[in-house]
Structure formats: C-alpha cells, structure tokens
Image (tube, rainbow, N blue to C red):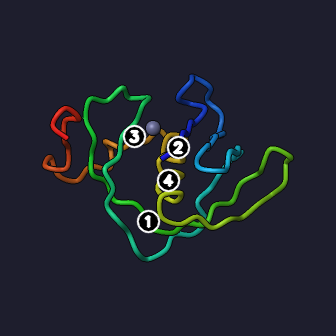
Amino acid sequence: MGRRLAAPQIGDPVRIIHLNARDRAFFMFNPKIVNKGDEQFDVWDFCFSAKAAFVAKVSRYCSISVEYYDERGQHTVERFDDDWSELIQHEVDHLNGILFVDRVSHPQSIKMIEHL
Ligand SMILES: [Zn+2]
C-alpha cells in the first residue's frame, strides 16, 4: 500500500516521515506513538531502504494514536487503524533505528520474495 519514507532512509537524521497512500499525502514532524490498542496483527513486511530480497512476518498494533506536527506546524493527535497503523509503525521504527527485521521472532517468518 502506498509510499512512505522516513528522513533517516535518505541520510537525514531528523524525525520526519512522509506518507503517500490512497487519497492522502502528508508529513509528520516528530511523530510519537502515544497510544497502542490491545490487538495486534501479523503482516508480511518489506523495506525498500533495506533493498531486501525477502519479506518478514512482523506483529503490529491494529490501532495507534500518533502525536505529531503537520506541515503547518499544527500540533495534532490522530488515530490510525489497520494498514495505516502498520505503515506508520514501520516508519516511526526507522526514526528509532529499528528495521522490520529487528522485529522478526522466528526464522520461519522470513520468506524470499522469489518464493512468494
Ligand atoms: Zn522501511
């Protein structure tokens, strides 16, 4: 789903992510996940930045609330669900130096893309 990028992926050590999916494209400045729902789901994740030849099954929260500043400097707290939630957790991880492979719990949770 869509395109996303965290500034550290292009060598900029600042806490900015950009999301572009479906009918919405926006920046999040200094995003913080301030609330996580109880439920989690498994997703086959991938990262363009890692130029990975594989996907890995990771667990993500179904629902999160994120505190961030938008491109006008407006302080915002917004709830995101499902694929948006997964997308943002992946990007916030980048800001914290965490890659999707760091969240793999079992070797069986990795699949080569050519085998998909
Ligand atoms: Zn990534």
The residue pinned by badge 1 equals: 61
SS at mark 4 in the image: helix
Q: Is mark 3 within 8 Å of ligand 1?
A: yes
Q: Quadrant of the C terminus?
A: top left
Residue located at (61% from left, 44% from top): 19
- Name the amino acid type tagged 4: Gln
Helix, strand or loop at mark 2: loop
* Location of residue 84 with respect to 5 vertically, above or below: below
First of labels 1, 2 by sequence position: 2
- At label 3, which amino acid type do we have? Leu
- In which quarter of the view is residue 11 placed? top right
Residue 40 drawn at (x, y percent): 38, 69
Residue on which the image places disc 2: 2
- Of 29 and 112, nearer the camera is 112
Residue at 31% across, 30% down: 52
Real-space Cα separation, disc 1 to disc 2, in angstroms:
19 Å
Q: Say whether disc 4 or disc 2 marks the residue closer to the N-terminus.
A: 2
**In the image, ligand 1 is in what quadrant?**
top left
- Please name the amino acid that badge 1 sits on: Tyr
Ranked by sequence position, the earlier of labels 4 and 3 is 4
Mark 4 or 2: in front is 2
Residue 110, labelled with which disc?
none
Mark-to-mark CA distance, 1 and 4: 8 Å
From mark 4 to mark 3, how far is it between C-alphas? 11 Å
Q: Quadrant for residue 32, please give it.
A: bottom right
Question: Residue 89, which numbered label?
Answer: 4
Residue 99 disc label:
3
Task: Tell me the quarter of the picture where residue 13 sits.
Answer: top right
Q: Give the percent coordinates (x, y) of residue 17.
A: 63, 41
